Amino acid sequence: MQIPISFIDITEKVGKDINLVQGPGGNISYKDNGYMYIKASGTKMSDVKKKNIFVKTNYKKILSAISNEDLDPVKNSWEEDNGIRPSIETSMHAIMPHKFVLHVHCVNTLSWIVQKNYPNKLNSILKGENWSSVPYRKPGICLSKEIKKVIDQNKSDVILLSNHGIVAGADTPEKVYGLIKRISQKLYLGELGNNKINVTNFNNYLLSEVYKLPRFEYVHQIAFSRKHTLIATKGTLFPDQIVFLENGIVIINNVKEFKNLLKLRRNNLPVILIPNIGILVPNDFNEVNENILLGLSMIISRIPINSSIKYLKKREIDELLNWDLEKHRQKINN
Ligand SMILES: [Zn+2]
């Protein structure tokens, strides 16, 4: 398949930008001659120059399956013999009328779209942009239907997906990247200050040899703010948090509580947050887990102190946990 070099370059640039993409999240596509080339499920945009990460799909077939209310509109839209399958967000890319479509889990954007009533707050910040927002829906066909409504109504180029991310479209890869970066910059208001951790404070916890320090020092910041500690531990903000931080984050105040946790949660150890000391992760925490935790802490640290948060509901979490396509994405990243 002939993929434009500028598209490959932009894909790599986005994939290496932790502000936009963490782990296998985010995806990009382009439409040409009746086909749509889209990132494969579970692959990383940053790997685009190392291996083929794109699947060729028949997007007109996908569009007609969507209008026929087909529950799995992507089925039979690609050649299945090469071992990779199109992203679980393929129908969203097909619905967007633009030639180039980019979807990312931008941390500046997420710090807004997890807040109650955020569209009203953004009216003045995003003035002059052709944007809309949609409520949270399970990625896939349910989300695509919401997007279709706002596209038909407003012909938006940028759509904010509540508790999930941002999708944008344009007629060149450079333009769609520029659009996402511009919105991302406008949505940045500030973040938590830089508290230095004291590693000796972790000694009693590290003795267990079950936990280790997280790879990125940045993630400790949320442990130094009561408000942000609660945001991190009270609920789930976005889908990849359930898929790749599936055991959650738990507040541990002292060694006694820690020992109890080891007894009770031996087989599903959470990330632990020790107030005013920092964060520890289970020893088997892998690269994707580290990246999702970094993304989560960047999002939380950008949330203003006086905001009220909208978490995913239990029903919304359950439908992600029981979804075989998410299990596929989780499996190839573990
Ligand atoms: Zn997404």
Image: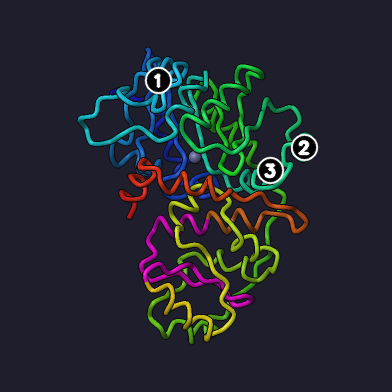
Q: CA distance from mark 2 to mark 1?
A: 33 Å
For residue 187, the mark is 3
Q: Nearer the viewer, mark 3 or mark 1?
A: 1
Percent across and percent down for residue 77 are 32, 22
Image quadrant in which the C terminus is located: bottom left
Q: Is residue 98 left or right of residue 55?
A: right
| The one of 10 and 203 positioned closer to us in this rendering | 203
Percent across and percent down for residue 285 are 39, 64
Q: Residue at x 48, y 53 (%)?
A: 242
Q: Residue at x 63, y 56 (%)?
A: 300
In the image, residue 320 above or below residue 101: below
Please say whether residue 231 is visible from this viewpoint.
yes
The residue that mark 2 highlights is 120
Q: Is mark 2 within 8 Å of ligand 1?
A: no
N-term-proximal mark, 3 vs 1: 1
Q: Which residues are magenta?
A: 267-294
Q: Secondary structure at mark 2?
A: helix
Cβ atoms under marks 3 and 1 closer than 8 Å: no
The residue that mark 1 highlights is 62
Which of the 4 quarters of the picture holds residue 286?
A: bottom left
